[in-house]
Structure formats: structure tokens, C-alpha cells
Amino acid sequence: MSGDTFLTIGDLARRTGLPVKTVRFYADRGIVPPTHRAPTGHRRFDHTAAARLDLVRTLRELGVDLATVRRVLDRETTVAEVAAAHADALDAHLAVLVLRRAVLRWLGSNPEEIALVHELALLSADARRLLVADFLADVFNGRPEVEGIARTLTPELPDDPQPAQVAAWVELAELTRDPGFRALLARLAAHYGFGGVRDGFGGLRGDGTGGGVGGNGSGGLRPDVVAVVRDRVRPLLGTDPASPEAGTVVAEITQRYGDEVAEHLEAANDPRRERYLTLLALINGWAEPESTRAELTWFLDAHRARN
């Protein structure tokens, strides 16, 4: 090979756009070793070394660490394998960046919540699931027959959430950490169950046909009491809860669900339950759930009037 076919470190720097210092660093580390040494001792490189340096520069610009670059050059791994791994890492990083963008937009109008957001809103997707899974496991006490219902009560913050969804997630996470709220929902689950998918926990489905986990130790399935009361009472809203017709409805529901039904419905009428469902729907992109407060309040008034 004639001498004029070799490239100096300066030639490589001009060819690749890298500083001479950087090219010398790669040469010193053996990442782009010299092809030849001139009689003066200066390093010389052929066009294969130049192509190798082009690959090093590209991989480094893509964020590949030096040890991995060396493995690629030594053919211990392939560029395709490295690219796939880094693409996966970038996907995860982008998801974090997108969430942070939504959080920062929300914080623009809620600066006082910054400590809470840092703790909750920036949790990884897995950490968010674990937080809610722990809450639901506590509420349902590990009962396998309600596993499907528990899944419908799990929020899934999207990869590119709106600021309102971030705010909803923060508020919902606060609710799940409230011992009083946990105890309230555990009582609801233990007495009459939560109904069918997105139903008994507050009428998210709205048709009242889903079977709920039977109360009083039966373990069977039956329509959830909240959905039944909602459907039975709605046509009567506006009438006197102390009327004979109201008394008939109370007697019917009590006979069907037992004497503790009023206590259960008092718990179901707690605004925190409905708030959880509203936040859940917002986070998951569902339609806003219908409220059952008017129906439950009317029934409880009728129950007190009758008793």
C-alpha cells in the first residue's frame, strides 16, 4: 500500500467532523487502532479505520456507551442488537419525559402540590400499579372471586397524559393511601360485594345486570344492591320518601338484602367512593360515571322514615 493512501489523525478528524483530541483518544484506547506507523512514529490509518471511526461516532451520538461500542467493533454483539436495546431504553425514557411534561404543565397552576407530585405522579408505571394493587388487595382481602372487578378499578395513566389526568392520578393516589377510605371500601366489599364489571362499585356500567359477590357469607353472585336501588328508586325521585310507596320499596330492598342494607348504603353513599370512580374514569379515558347520590339519599331518607 503506497503511503499516500494512509490517513493521519488530522485527516480522520476532518473526514468525520470530530475533534483531533477525540480521534486521538479512540486511537489511544485501541477502539480505532492505527493501520500503520510512519518512520517518524506517527500513526496512519486506512479507509477501513475511517469507516470504523464513522461507526463509533454514530453509536456514540446515539448514546451508546464506550464499552458497548467496543463490543460491537469486536463483534461480540451486533449493531442490530445494540440498536434494539437502545430503542427500548429510549421508549422508556420518552415515556418518562412525556409524563414529566404533563406534570410540569399541571404544576404551572398548582405549585403548592410539587412535593406530592414528585412522590406520586412520577412513579414508574409498575410502581403506580403496585400502589393501587396493594390498595385493592387490602380492600378485597385477597378474595379470588372479585379479581376481575379489582382489575376494573385499576387506573392506567396513559403514556401521554393530559394535565387533568395527572391531577386525577395524584388525587386518586391520595385516596388509596387514606386508611379510612380503605376501611370504608373493605366494608362495602365484605357486605354485599361490588357487583359486575364496573357496576356494583358505583354503577359505572349502568345496567345493573352484572352479578355481584353475594353478602352474608353466601359467596354466590347476585345483582349489586347499589345498582338495584338506583334503578328501583330513580322513577320515584321527587316523591315523598315518607310515602307508602317509598315504604314498599324499602321493605322490598330490605327483604332482598337484609336488615343491614341501610348501613351498607350509607357507606356506599360516601362521596369518596363516587370521587374515586370519577377520577378512575378520567384517568382511564372512560365516560364520566353517573352519580347515584340522589337515589341512595332518597332511599336512606325513606328507610329512616319507615323505621
Image (cartoon, grey):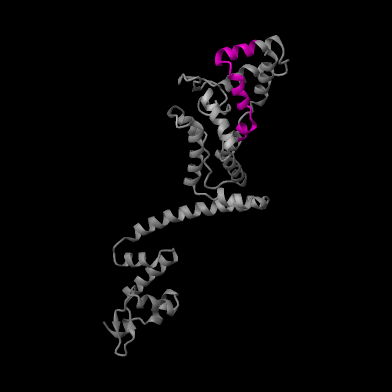
Q: For the point 32% across and 84% down, which residue is it?
A: 4
The answer to which of 296 and 17 lies nearer the viewer is 296
Q: Is residue 82 above or below residue 157?
A: below
Report the side of 3 relative to 173 (left or right).
left
Q: Nearer the viewer, residue 244 or 303?
A: 303
Give percent across and percent down for residue 238: 73, 18
Q: Nearer the viewer, residue 49 or 41?
A: 41
| Vertical position of residue 130 compared to residue 88: above or below | above
Image position of 45 with respect to 253: above or below = below
Residue 292 sits inside the magenta stretch = no
What percent of the width, then of the height, locates residue 53?
A: 37, 72
**Prevailing SS of the magenta stretch:** helix
Magenta stretch contains residue 263: yes
Magenta region: which residues? 248-275
Q: Which image quarter holds the C terminus?
A: top right
Whole-percent x, y for residue 149 in the image: 49, 30
Residue 102 in sight in this render: no
Q: Residue furthest left?
A: 1
Q: Residue at x 61, y 47 (%)?
A: 163
